[in-house]
Amino acid sequence: MRFMMLMIPLGYETAAPDVQLDPERVAAMMRYNEVLNDAGVLITLDGLHPPSMGARVSFAAGKPIVTDGPFAEAKEVLGGYWMIEVASRAEAIAWARRCPAAPNEIIEIRQVQEMSDFPPDVQEAAAGFGDLKK
């Protein structure tokens, strides 16, 4: 089972484009990342620039509208993610609990939908999806 562990650093929604990272926090996170990798559960991971450097494309009016960050209405934003492969939701939670997160950080855990989770008609409609990911 694949899970995404989504890092939500509270306050990051208003971070400046040149936000500075604490080297000690980065070192602690790297040690955690190495443990995930050494355990054979890590698929990929990345940190994300703050929303002030991003853009959103919305479609509420029936056509794409681009809004540059920061986003005034944002209360929580992603700071990064890990994709892991483990045997269960409980194991994913156990890995998240080991993260050296700061008091202002939350990790949301979401299971990745596998094609086998869907009924045959949906699998047929999504035929070729696996080939796109390679």
Image (tube, rainbow, N blue to C red):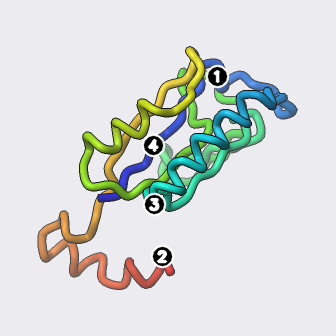
Left or right: 56 in relation to 35: right
Tell me the residue at 62%/44% (across/down): 56
Residue bearing the label numbered 4: 5
Q: Nearer the viewer, residue 113 or 90?
A: 90
Helix, strand or loop for disc 2: loop
The residue carrying pointer 1 sits among few (fewer than 14), some (14 to 19) or many (20 or more) residues within 10 Å by Cα, namely few
Residue 40, numbered circle: 3
Q: Are marks 1 and 3 in contact (CB under 8 Å)?
A: no
Q: Are marks 2 and 3 in contact (CB under 8 Å)?
A: no
Q: Disc 2 or disc 1, which is closer to the eye?
A: 2
**Residue type at the position of mark 2:** Lys
Provide residue 35's location: percent of width, then percent of height. 54, 47
**Residue type at the position of mark 4:** Met
Mark 2 to mark 1 CA distance (whole Å): 33 Å
Mark 4 to mark 2 CA distance (whole Å): 20 Å
Residue bearing the label numbered 1: 72
Q: Earlier in the sequence, mark 2 or mark 1?
A: 1
Residue 133, numbered circle: 2
Residue 125, numbered circle: none
Helix, strand or loop for disc 4: strand
Provide residue 38's location: percent of width, then percent of height. 52, 56
Q: Disc 1 or disc 3, which is closer to the eye?
A: 3
Asked which quadrant contains residue 81, the reply is: top right
Q: Are marks 4 and 1 in contact (CB under 8 Å)?
A: no
Q: Earlier in the sequence, mark 3 or mark 4?
A: 4
Tell me the residue at 43%/54% (across/down): 84
